[in-house]
Structure formats: structure tokens, C-alpha cells
Amino acid sequence: MKIEKQSFGKTASGEEALLYTITNKNGMSASFTDFGAIIVKIMVPDRWGKLEDVVLGYDDLGPYEHNEPGYGSFIGRNANRIKDAVIRIHNKTYELEKNDGQNNLHGGSVGYNKYMYKTKVLSKENLVSIEFYRVSPDMEQGFPGELKVSITYTLTDENELILNYHGVSDQDTVVNLTNHSYFNLAGHGSGTVLNQKVMILANQFTPTDNELIPTGEIWDVSDTPMDFRTLKPIGQDIFKEYPPLKQAGGYDHNYILNKTNQGKTVEKAAELVDEKSGRVMEVYTDMPGIQLYTGNFITGTETGKEGIVYVKRGGVCFETQYYPNSCNTPEFPSCILKAGEVYEHCTIYKFLVSK
């Protein structure tokens, strides 16, 4: 296991960013930058041992300062949407940025993926981890409380990329962190993921209104295009005349995971399979929900890594999370973090090959 560090360019304000790459004994590697704590690259072997980069992104720092799709992004203080961009804590109202119509999305236009992070490299036996840390000030993005927040990435020799989220606030606040990597197991520039297969261990999902805010209802996936309980191609049902799919222009929905010990242990949540290359990715988490997002808003006009213009649905996201708008929906698991308590969650992306 080794880690390398190199320059990744300078921000518009003149801060130098670095790129850290961890490589395991199998040749798999993962690269991260201290600008935004972003996952920049994940090199994974196929069934013949050929390495490909399986996440969408950019070759250098500049485009990450804008990064409208959120490629590889560390998302906070709140992942997903908050209705009317308003939260209420102890009968006090806090107004957030309306950056998604009348709603707040991923904390605001300046999310956690737009800040520089302090970095610590950790080595333990056959593991190498990199921790990105910063202090989010009271009222940043409109959220109360100074939040000491970190994301730690660990690569194992079992081809697991482990994401450990940690936060402590000095006031009651909203905390719901996730990662917004777009995966394409055929390679980041290989076109759409519509032929790749997905499985999600969820019997239910949270339907939304036309602004993609959950209604508070819980619907069963049975006999609907939302059913991914067994592997099926992403494109099999995505164009069906089904209201939730028409509302979102594809899949952009929160699934309620079938957890046997909810919130206590890391369990398998989802799987992505590219039969042509043999690459398989399993997703494990201790979070109650996962957002399946099929890159519906990729415009097809933006140049990514290696000069490739990414197409609509060129990647798929598996965003482990509390349910969207849970801070305003008492029936949902709560994303309110009490002062002094520890926010701690784990997600694992494990890469395998099929024969």
C-alpha cells in the first residue's frame, strides 16, 4: 500500500491544492484532492486485469471550482433537498439559499465541495487512510452551529474504498453528509450506464412532488419500475410512463433500505454490474436511505477527463443518506444532530470482478 502526493493546481483565490493517490497491492488506486475533499479518480481492474477510471470528473482543479454536476463531491451540511429552503430547530426558523427552484439542494451553491481542507495521512498495518478536516462556522450556508467535520477515505487490499464521516457541533443543527460520485464501471468516458445493472435492497421508496421533495408518503416498489430488488439494467424501465420517473426525468429517488439493524451496523445496500468488463461494485452503509441518481441533468456539453464530453446518464450515483427533507418531516429518521453529540456514519464501495 502506498500513497503519493502531487500538485493539483491553484484555486482562483491562489490556494494550492494537492492530489493524493492511494494504491493497493492489486494495482487499484483512488485519488482525492484537498479542495472539496473530492474523489477525483478510482482506477479499477476488469476481469482481464485492465485498469479503468470508473468515476466522472475533471483532469485538473479549475473545473472543480464550478462543478455543477457535483462530480466526486463531498456533500454537506445537508445532502439532497430541503423544502422551501427553510429549517426549524427549537421553534426558530433558519432560511437557507434557494438554489434549486424554491428549495435548497446539497446545502447551497457553495457546498462542502468548494472549500479547502486540512489533511492527515494515516497508516495502520496494511491500510492507508487520508482524512480531510475543516471547521464549518456557525451560520455557514444558513445552518446553526460550528461544525467540526471530517471525511476519511481508506483503501484496502480487498479493493474496498471506505468512507467514514464524522462531525461534532456546538449547537443543535442539521447534518446529513454524503458523496456524489458518478460511477460508470465500463470507464468514465464509455457513454451511458443504461446497460449496466443495478440492485438495491429496498422494498420501499419515498415518492416526491414535482419539485422532487418527498411528500412524506412511503410507497412499495412491487410491480413498479422502481423495483431493483433483483439485478436489472438501468435502462430497462427508465423511460416508462410512470409519474415518479416523469417528474425526475429518470431515477432520482430515495430508497428506504431493508436494514436488519438500522443505524447500528454497515450492511449491503446496493450493487452495480457491468457485464462486459466484469466489474462489480457493491455498496455498504449504515445510513437508512440511498439516493439512486442516473445523471439526468448531465447536459452533454461539458468536457470531463481526457477531453471526453460526458453524455446524459453517463454515470450513476449511490448517495447514502438520511431521507431528503427529513429535517422537516417528523415521520422520517431525523438528521438533527444535538450539540456535543457525534455524527458518525460509514459507506463502503467494494469493487469485484465477475467471471
Image (cartoon, grey):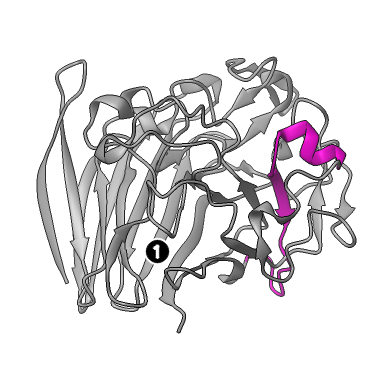
Which one is in front, 90 or 317? 317
Which one is in front, 270 or 52? 52
On screen, residue 345 above or below 350: above
Is residue 255 in the magenta section?
A: yes
**Residue at horizontal 9 percent and vertical 44 percent from the top:** 6
Q: Position of residue 204 (x, y in %)?
A: 82, 58
**Seen in the image, is 350 located left or right of residue 323?**
left
The residue where tag 1 is placed is 162
**Seen in the image, is 288 located left or right of residue 65?**
right
Q: Which residues are magenta?
A: 242-263
**Residue at horizontal 67 percent and vertical 52 percent from the top:** 235
The answer to whether residue 139 shows anywhere in this view is no
**Seen in the image, is 62 located left or right of residue 242?**
left
Residue neighbourhood size for the residue with mark 1, other residues' Cα within 10 Å, grouped as few (<14), some (14–19), many (≥20): some
**Residue at horizontal 88 percent and vertical 62 percent from the top:** 222
Q: Position of residue 179 (x, y in %)?
A: 47, 46
Label 1: element kind: strand
On screen, residue 203 above or below 343: below
Quarter of the rendering occupied by the C terminus: bottom left
